Image (cartoon, rainbow, N blue to C red):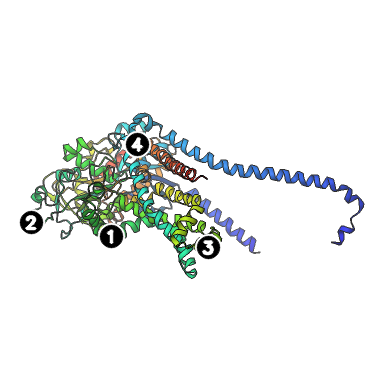
Amino acid sequence: MSTEHALPAGAIAQRPDALASRSQRDLSADRAFRWLVTGAGIFVLVSLFAAALSMLWGGRAAFSTFGIDFLTTTDWDAVGKKFGALVPIYGTLVTAAIAMIIAVPVSFGIALFLTEVAPPWLRTPVASAIELLAGIPSIIYGMWGLFVFVPVMSTTVIPFLTTHLGPLPIFGPLFQGPPLGIGMLTAGIVLAIMVIPFISSVMREVFLTVPTRLKESAYALGSTTWEVAWNVVLPYTRSAVIGGIFLGLGRALGETMAVTFVLGNAHHLTASLLMPGNSIAATIANEFSEADSDIYVSSLIALGFLLFIVTFVVLAIAKLMLMRLSRREGN
Amino acid sequence: MSTSFTTRIAFAGIAALAAVSAQAADITGAGATFVYPILSKWSADYSTKTGNKINYQSIGSGGGIAQIKAGTVDFGSSDKPLDPKELNEAGLGQFPSVIGGVVPVVNLQGVAGGKITFTGPLLADIFLGKITKWNDPAIAAVNAGLALPDGLITVVHRSDGSGTTFNWVNYLSKVSPAWKEKVGEGTSVQWPVGVGGKGNEGVAAYVKQIPGSIGYVELAYALQNKMTYGAMQNAAGKVVQPSRESFQAAAASADWTKAQDFYLIITNAPGDASWPIAATNFILMYKQPKDAARSKAALDFFKWAFEQGKTQAEQLDYVPLPDDLVKQIEAYWQAQIKTG
């Protein structure tokens, strides 16, 4: 403090200089920082495009040999060298859809319970338990699925579904077939359990950001907990909630190990959800190491490219729906 | 004080390492997962004896072929032999390493191991989806007296490409024209029916999970997992049990002398005692290697393994090569592989 008074006259004269150099330094530091974060942003874009392009390049033989047939045929014949990706694409979409149909409502329920309903002493332990679930490696889910869950499916759940839903006129064919326990429905359920932690912890975090006064106003007007959740909490956090669902969906589309264990890895196209199928990621994981011809390898890499496209299209459709929704509400 | 001491130890360690690596060539190999257990056992015993180490990566037969063709390993290993033309184009030589066998395994309540019998055409029809029930007259015909349930058959096959699959479908192609025409043979095929498990352990797990299922695994997996395996009617019309003896009989009855570059698949072998789905693993090496000393070290290792590694092989449920086949292989090395 006292030194300030003791400054010689010359120091004051130098001040503008010091200021100039300080602002110069700030400017260059600012510029460097800007480049740094721009680089980080571009890095993601570049690696995304590089990955997509290299897979397109690796799969070019498959695309040029089979053309559009690669997308529309169900052949997967390494001996006859005929490859079509319809079965893995279908399996990927169906298992991910089953997973989301189960996971989204359950995650919403978990998040709502933890932020609105549960007594405060219970909230932290349950939240930590969910985060622990997210940390379990997928192969553990796969083994649990195969050794614990599949027998339950084949002895109880699937016989129940085939007798009660199998004879129905329109949905019936979805639930017919022998009780193998291994198949698209089982894979979808295991996937749902895997993505629930991701979706529910995102939902919980964003539900906590809803201002208390908004909720309390609604309660004061006589709303029930459900009305508060549906009309206040959800609209306030919608874009973040959708982001969490996308995160889970992305994981469900690309999940490999757990699906390989319980999906059945069969290249057959069936209407029934109870029958084995195949997914893009599982096919690649299963067959890449022993793919013995160039066109086989190329077809597998092309499958990887298709997974990119499938994920992109699904996310784009979801984004579009979201935009239309917010436009309708006049935001 | 303490720093100089640690430094000295570190130096001594580096010097010792350098001395060891100067003495011992680290031989590298890659390929079939089928031989990984026996190669690592042999490698461990061989390295305590001679100090030479074998580094084997079990990345699958396809990977093994690719790696040796790229020249990144000293030897490759494949469950599917390459034909002499392909070998010639790549400048590779080929010889058998060890013999095993593929067995059908079932999940049928009340049927004990080895008590159910299959014929080749019967297995082909089951895997084609033509026979769908266990009490089908065709199954009953070769299993008189066995109570077969009125249940659906679920076929379990490998979902990954594999040498096990190759030998299995090679056999089915040999015994069933319909299979040969519709499906054919390869390390992975387009299966008409069934579910796919990843690896021998995947198939074993599926067969154990699904009542009424039938799959195929290496004998070692069937024994380790206490699975119900089936007996087979062989080419001579005799019913044989899967065992080291019947695998060895198949290997011995095969006519290796006429096979160029040992290009011979010993499925459906003749002979009363032969197991029909015996399988051979093959080693691939360059005939004119870039590094002759390393290739020589690799051949020394296999020579030791063939002559002194038989008990280890038997302990792990493999069948060591018959003596006269080993002699043929050694003659082949002399004539074909330049290591000096």
Discs 1 and 3 share one subunit: yes
Which residue in the structure is indicated by mark 1?
Answer: A152
Q: Are marks 1 and 2 in contact (CB under 8 Å)?
A: no
Q: Please tell me the numbered disc located at residue A296.
A: 4
Which residue in the structure is indicated by mark 2?
Answer: B145
At x 67%, y 43%, the residue is A32
Q: Residues within 10 Å of mark 1 (few under 14, many from 20)?
A: some
Element at badge 3?
A: helix
Element at badge 2?
A: loop
Q: Give the foreground label among 1 and 3.
A: 3
At x 39%, y 37%, the residue is A302
Residue type indicated by callout 1: Val
Q: Is residue B184 left or right of residue A41?
A: left
Q: Which of the two discs, 1 and 4, labels the residue nearer the N terminus?
A: 1
Determine the CA span between mark 4 and mark 2: 46 Å
Which residue in the structure is indicated by mark 3?
Answer: A216
